[in-house]
Amino acid sequence: MAILKALPSLAIISGYKGTLDFYYTMGIPVCRSWPRSPGSDRAVAVKEQWPVFTAAARLWPLLSEEVQDAYNAMASGSTLSGRDMASKMYINASKILPY
Amino acid sequence: MPAPLDCFAVLTISYNYFATNFPITITTNNPCHLWLRWSVTVPQKHINPIIVRGAPIGTYIDQCFVAFHDIEQSEPGDRWTHTFYSPAWPACQRRWFYFHGTVGGIVSPSASPIFTKHRPWTTTHYSDINTGATTCDATITNSPCWLLWPDFITSTGTGSYPTAATLSIMLYAHTTPDRWRGLRRSIMTFDLTDIPGTHKVLAAAFYLKLASKRDTHGDKPHIAVFAATPGAMNNIVPADLTNIGATPLTNQIGYDAFGAGPHNEFLFSIPGLAALKPGRLNAIAIRESKFDATGISPPWVSSKQMYFITYSVDAPSSTYRPYLKVAHAPLGV
């Protein structure tokens, strides 16, 4: 990552699409190489998270219509879908509801 | 990050409208021990922007849930099915609730979505005794007759018993091959005018107490509740034998399951609920549902008999009377 004095023009940023990524972090203009998926070559700690995400992703079709409706109602007005909300609430609901 | 077995999700939720303490039953994907957290205060939703690299890319939700109370599940230990009893939930009160809990004694990071439920009113209805009041109940019969099966099940009635202590349904074979000699069905009418016409029926159940039953040749007859359109609501007459529908409004109960202990419960299906009209007099019927309602003839055997005899509103003990329970609430609540 490189710290810049200022972000270049949008035309320059667009020209580097797929090669360089320009953005602000903490208000500081920076540039980094274009992000690429590491595929399955991930850290052990990251891999340990996969089963719960897999379980969360498979839940939705198992939920009754009334339960799905409740998630949809909770997610309404936000950019989340009811299915997103179900996954979040399954993995960690403490940021959404009082514990 | 939790392991999948540390988490739980509520898969289904159901309500028993007819229990006095309005139990709520849920199933979960993993065994866990749960609490129902409820409040009568409307939860406030706060939608906040998600800022990534200085740009808003979406929103997330904070959900306020205040002035809450917890009810622990009634089952001990970690279970897949969980029942919560709310004895202090008044009729017509809306509550918001969600479920949280532990897995293996450790607090689970999961929670259910917030549900909301308005507890409906539940009213119990009996027919009036004898005839001439507002409602009544009666068995209608075509007996003795000498008819082939198709004519038998579409035949008109020859008698009705609106003051008898019992209601019955019966199929009775003649001694002549392929001929049938006795048919019985019963109609009950109920006054639902104390339910405002603006209310919606959310659930209903009909309760019937068995007096005796017979199945001479192991045909295993079934009994169910059907729609009825008698000519008068306060007197059932022979002509009403054919004023009975052929599509069950409720579950069917088989011969073996129809017991002599407490009242047998017929739960109305969702389509069946449409047959009940608040603010009016209503009629329903009981009919043999495996053969009589379907039109499928059981094998003829001389003098074959199958019947259920149940107590009517005119039974000597008032605790034996059949009754209809209705859960209802204003439309849109």
Image (tube, grey):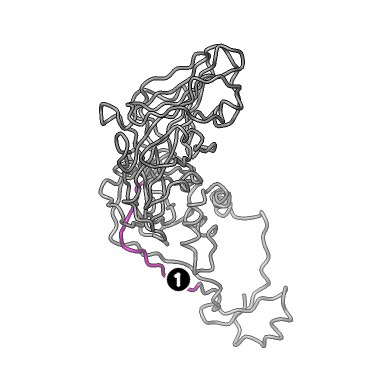
- Magenta stretch, overall SS: strand
Give the chain letter at badge 1.
B
Where residue B125 appears, as percent x and y from the top left, is: 32, 42
Where residue B190 appears, as percent x and y from the top left, is: 36, 42
Seen at 31% across and 55% down, the residue is B92
Q: Is residue B131 left or right of residue B45?
A: left
Is the residue A70 above or below the residue B265 in the image?
Answer: below
Crowding at dot 1, Cα within 10 Å, few <14 / some 14-19 / many 20+, comes out as some
Which secondary structure lies at badge 1? strand
Where residue A49 appears, as percent x and y from the top left, is: 54, 52
Quadrant, the C terminus of chain B: bottom left
Seen at 38% across and 30% down, the residue is B264
- The number of discs equals 1
Toward the viewer: A62 or B206?
B206
Q: Is residue A86 magenta?
A: no
Q: Residue most toward the right? A: A15
Is the residue B305 above or below the residue B200 in the image?
Answer: above
Where residue B287 appears, as percent x and y from the top left, is: 48, 31
Seen at 67% across and 88% down, the residue is A9
Q: Is residue B249 left or right of residue A7?
A: left
Q: Quadrant of residue A46?
A: bottom right
Toward the viewer: B87 or B148?
B148
Q: Please provide the residue range marked out in magenta.
A: B35-49
Q: Quadrant of residue B234?
A: top left
Q: Which residue is labeled 1 in the image?
A: B47
Toward the viewer: B134 or B71?
B134
Residue B250 in sight from this viewpoint: yes
Residue type (three-letter) at the residue carrying disc 1: Ile
Is the residue B82 above or below the residue B173 in the image?
Answer: below
Q: Is residue B46 magenta?
A: yes
Residue B1 in sight from this viewpoint: no
